[in-house]
Amino acid sequence: MTAYNVQHRLLQTSEQDTQKWKKSNPILFKKATALLLEIMEHPRTGLGHPEALVGGDGITYSRHIIAHDRIIYDIYDDIVRVFVIQLEEHYSDK
């Protein structure tokens, strides 16, 4: 799967985040894209300190993009797909 296909599997808000970063912060865009590609190959290990989220039933995971931005995603092993739920402002409530 290519980066193009990954982006089209993002939810609409996550797609908007990546497009915003592509223009305003190319370094962040490149890092997020690399993490998305890695998630496709190794959803539970690798860069960005992947961790299962409490209350996520072992399906929902998080990875660091930068200090306050995370990729939040679900892993469904039975259908071999990863769904990205959120990219930005995981800790915006703090």
Image (tube, grey):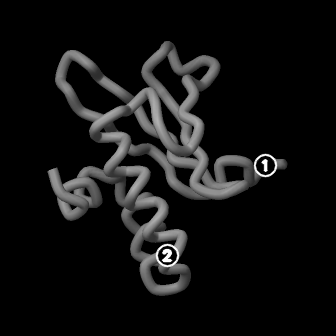
Identify whether 15 is placed above or below 46: below
Residue at the spot x=60%, y=47% of the render?
64
Residue at the spot x=78%, y=49% of the render?
93
In the image: residue 5, left or right of residue 26: left
Spatial separation of the CA atoms under disc 1 and disc 2: 21 Å
Q: Earlier in the sequence, mark 1 or mark 2?
A: 2
Identify whether 40 is placed above or below 86: above
Identify whether 7 is placed above or below 79: below
Please state the horizontal and vertical placement of residue 20, each as a whole percent of the image: 47, 77
Residue 59: mark in rendering: none
Identify whether 2 is placed above or below 73: below
Residue at the spot x=18%, y=23% of the render?
79
Please state the horizontal and vertical placement of residue 39, each as a whole percent of the image: 37, 41
In the image: residue 19, left or right of residue 67: left
Residue that carries the numbered disc 1 in the rendered image: 93
Image quadrant in which you'd find residue 4: bottom left
Residue that carries the numbered disc 2 in the rendered image: 21
Look at discs 1 and 2 and give the one toward the viewer.
2
Per the image, label 1 sits on a secondary structure element best described as loop
Under mark 1, the amino acid is Asp
Under mark 2, the amino acid is Trp
Dot 1 crowding, Cα within 10 Å, few <14, some 14–19, many 20+: few
Image quadrant in which you'd find residue 44: top left
Please state the horizontal and vertical placement of residue 6, each as a whole percent of the image: 26, 54
Dot 2 crowding, Cα within 10 Å, few <14, some 14–19, many 20+: some
